[in-house]
């Protein structure tokens, strides 16, 4: 069984695989594989603000050193910044210690290739296979060294600012930025303030335990309230590792990843810079697909996970894709989803068009979409999805919806959950059918 889910290795700290022993062996296994694959014998390691990051950083560092790999420690750094520095510093790989939008008691590891992209299946398989071998340290004269990476944040800040046109600035624009008490707590305020924004910052006081706690892209109430109170033009919510962004318009209304994609795609299409189509996922709202179709813009769906969106963009030669959760990939700006850069792209459109955020997303209809997450701790999520009662409930729902809706039923790749999502024309119907299927999943959980 693979150690890796849809977004790396993730779990509860202190339980397998998020233990010091397994993390050290993962560092050794990944170092043994990637040092042969990459362009140097160096790996970058960054993290978010979880208290467990110290432990995991040390364990991974020991494993890499045992494999003969040198380590450059970045400290707290947004995931897309680690991807960027991995590529520009010519490292063999970049390692992110983070559980993204999860609470502090979870943690995980994501690994970027030397090109700053998520690892492909072949490399993941090689690392999994290496994990099955006994850990053997290289000779003492080949043991890896560790050092601090100089000015990692400053280099990433300059990348972010370089994606914003020189002839524009954010002077006079009221922004509220929610840093989720996460990896972007220092970088994000500097980027937006150095570009001239009238800035209000919330959730930028991490203590190791408050990452994503009632803040960030999964908890928007505080951002909405602050936007209204400050009468700001826009609210920006990052997640714990800074690769997601959701927004709030000037009226306090949520603008999710699908609407951000629509805004960017429409503007790029009008400017002639879209270069092809847009990639979304199984969870992308049907309204985005239809709005793009009406404008003659190609659209494809992938499995859930930004790595699959990235693969679709590369295979099609496209630039723009993402998820409704806020992973927005602009391949002409960075090699992976980037919350800060995506926000800057939206701000650029607002300034170029002189329109508020609410007007820019008004052309995309939103189909009613209901998702229920069923906790399945200790159960086989894949087996639950295939349970007879669940299958029967899905078939009945499909008959009732006909061509006016769709169902997505899948195990989460990052949490012990089964996700049930239905989309259709009638919210009450969608809500009822979603909860009916979720109830059948709960009934299938072994006592």
Image (cartoon, grey):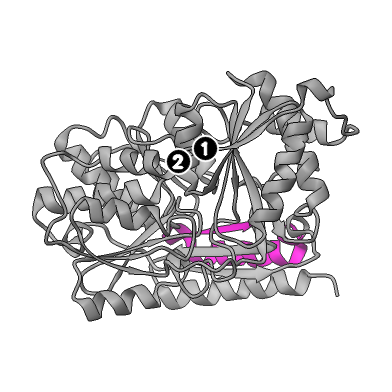
Q: Is residue 395 magenta?
A: yes
Task: Residue at the far right: name it.
Answer: 134
Residue 366: x and y in percent read 33, 63
Which residue: 81% across, 43% down? 1
Q: Are marks 2 and 1 in contact (CB under 8 Å)?
A: yes
**x 60%, y 36%: residue:** 147
Question: Which image quadrant is residue 303 in?
Answer: top right
Q: Secondary structure at mark 2?
A: helix
Q: Is residue 184 above or below residue 80?
A: below
Looking at this view, is 124 or 137 the one in front? 137
Residue 119: quadrant of the picture: top right
Question: What span is colored magenta in the figure?
Answer: 384-413
The answer to whether residue 83 is magenta is: no
Q: Viewed as shown, does residue 151 lie left or right of 165?
A: right
Numbered tag placed on residue 149 in the rendering? 1
The location of residue 243, given as percent across then percent down, is 45, 50
Q: Which residue is mark 2?
A: 152
Question: Which is the main secondary structure of the residues drawn in magenta?
Answer: helix
**Is 259 left, or right, of 241 in this rendering?**
left
Where disc 1 sits, the SS reads loop
In the rendered view, would you say 421 is above or below 1? below
Front-most of 244 and 18? 18
Q: Position of residue 121 (x, y in %)?
A: 66, 32
């Amino acid at each position: 069984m693979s150690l890796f889910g849809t977004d790396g290795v993730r779990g509860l700290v202190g339980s397998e695989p998020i233990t010091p022993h397994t993390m050290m062996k993962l560092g050794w296994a990944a170092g043994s594989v990637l040092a042969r694959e990459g362009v140097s014998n160096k790996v970058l390691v960054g993290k978010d603000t979880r208290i467990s990051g110290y432990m995991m950083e040390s364990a991974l560092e020991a494993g890499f050193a045992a494999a003969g790999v040198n380590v450059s420690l970045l400290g707290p750094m947004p995931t897309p910044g680690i991807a960027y520095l991995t590529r520009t510093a010519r490292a063999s790989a970049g390692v992110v210690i983070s559980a993204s939008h999860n609470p502090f008691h979870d943690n995980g590891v994501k690994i970027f290739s030397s090109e700053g992209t998520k690892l492909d299946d072949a490399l993941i398989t090689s690392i999994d296979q290496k994990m099955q071998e006994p850990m053997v340290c290289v000779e003492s004269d080949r043991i890896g060294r560790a050092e601090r990476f100089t000015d990692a944040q400053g280099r990433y800040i300059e990348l972010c600012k370089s994606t914003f046109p020189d002839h524009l600035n954010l002077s006079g624009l009221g922004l509220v930025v929610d840093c989720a008490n996460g990896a972007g707590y220092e970088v994000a305020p500097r980027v937006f303030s150095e570009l001239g924004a009238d800035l209000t910052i919330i959730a930028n006081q991490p203590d190791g335990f408050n990452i994503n706690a009632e803040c960030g892209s999964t908890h928007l109430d505080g951002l909405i309230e602050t936007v209204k109170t400050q009468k700001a033009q826009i609210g920006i919510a990052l997640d714990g590792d800074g690769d997601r962004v959701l927004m709030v318009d000037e009226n306090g209304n949520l603008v999710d990843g699908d609407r951000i994609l629509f805004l960017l795609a429409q503007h790029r299409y009008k400017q002639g810079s879209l270069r092809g189509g847009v990639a979304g996922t199984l969870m992308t709202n049907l309204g985005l697909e239809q709005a793009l179709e009406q404008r003659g813009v190609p659209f494809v769906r992938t499995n859930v996970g930004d790595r699959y969106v990235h693969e679709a963009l590369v295979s099609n030669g496209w630039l723009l894709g993402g998820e409704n959760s806020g992973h927005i990939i602009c391949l002409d700006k960075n090699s992976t989803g980037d919350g800060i850069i995506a926000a800057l792209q939206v701000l650029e459109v607002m300034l170029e068009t002189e329109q508020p955020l609410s007007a820019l997303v008004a052309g995309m209809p939103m189909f009613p979409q209901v998702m229920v997450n069923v906790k399945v701790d200790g159960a086989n999520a894949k087996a639950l999805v295939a349970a007879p009662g669940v299958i029967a409930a899905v078939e009945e729902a499909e008959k009732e919806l006909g061509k006016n809706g769709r169902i997505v039923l899948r195990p989460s790749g990052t949490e012990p959950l089964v996700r049930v999502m239905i989309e259709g024309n009638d919210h009450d119907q969608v809500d009822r059918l979603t909860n009916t299927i979720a109830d059948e999943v709960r009934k299938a959980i072994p006592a």
